[in-house]
Amino acid sequence: MQTKFIFVTGGVMSGLGKGVVTSSIAKLLQLSNQKVSCVKIDPYLNYDAGTMNPVAHGEVYVTDDGGECDMDIGNYERFLNQNLRKTHNITTAQIYSAVIEAERKGEYLGACVQIIPHITDEIKKRIRQIAADEQLDFLVVECGGTVGDIESLPFLEALRQMRLEEGPQGVLFVHVTLAPSLDVVGEQKTKPTQHSVQELRRIGIQPDIMAVRCTEPLLE
């Protein structure tokens, strides 16, 4: 059977726990006797997390093969009790560097190199390569950042394309958002989530599952 992909996106604001949601989904699949792994996409332009301020970004997590990765990779390893390779942390700089290097070698045969299809193809190739190399039943991919960020658009477009290419039976979208409770009126507000889903739909992605964070259980 072909690998099935679960893409986790985030809306409203950062820090809602996309990494924990991703790790938890993967763990549930693992407990169901599925061969599963995780990937973290970081849309920032750094090549890796090695040179970033740990106070602002969080501690660097170093993999067995020497990769200096986002700390969510550490979450995945602890939840799944498996060692991940540095290829499981994909950044914008890695994607663009690979495409520019290929262009300099003439691999695009003089074509005008563009975000679509060349950048998005490289993103899809890396995700599928991990699934193929490790012969996975499921690959859970967390797309860092928040929907609406300019830097995450090429990644979201690549994930949208994969939904079309793999079919609805091969790709599932999980969207993590916030339903805040306002002290003044004493009720939960879903408007931030509505706007977040609207933004996601605007770029062609319809979430299948919503993971809504709130201080009290979400009212029906």
Image: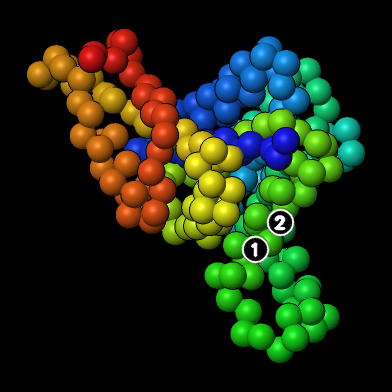
Residue 59 percent across, percent down from the top left: 68, 32
Q: Is residue 211 left or right of residue 137?
A: left
- The amino acid type of the residue labelled 1 equals Asp
Which residue, given by chain and number where applicable, does mark 1 sit on? 121
Q: In front here: 84 or 66? A: 84
Residue 127 horizontal/vertical position (percent): 69, 48
| Picture layout, residue 14 above or below residue 211 | below
Q: Residue at x 68, y 61 (%)?
A: 122
Numbered tag placed on residue 125 in the rendering: 2
The quarter in which the N terminus is drawn is top right
- Judging depth in this view, the residue of 56 and 34 nearest the camera is 34
Q: Position of residue 206 (x, y in %)?
A: 38, 43
* Tag 2 and tag 1, C-beta contact below 8 Å: yes
Residue 120 located left or right of residue 181: right
**Alpha-carbon neighbours of circle 2 within 10 Å: few (<14), some, or many (≥20)?**
few
Task: List the single residue furthest toward the bottom.
Answer: 110
Judging depth in this view, the residue of 89 and 49 nearest the camera is 89
Q: In what element is the residue under mark 2? A: helix
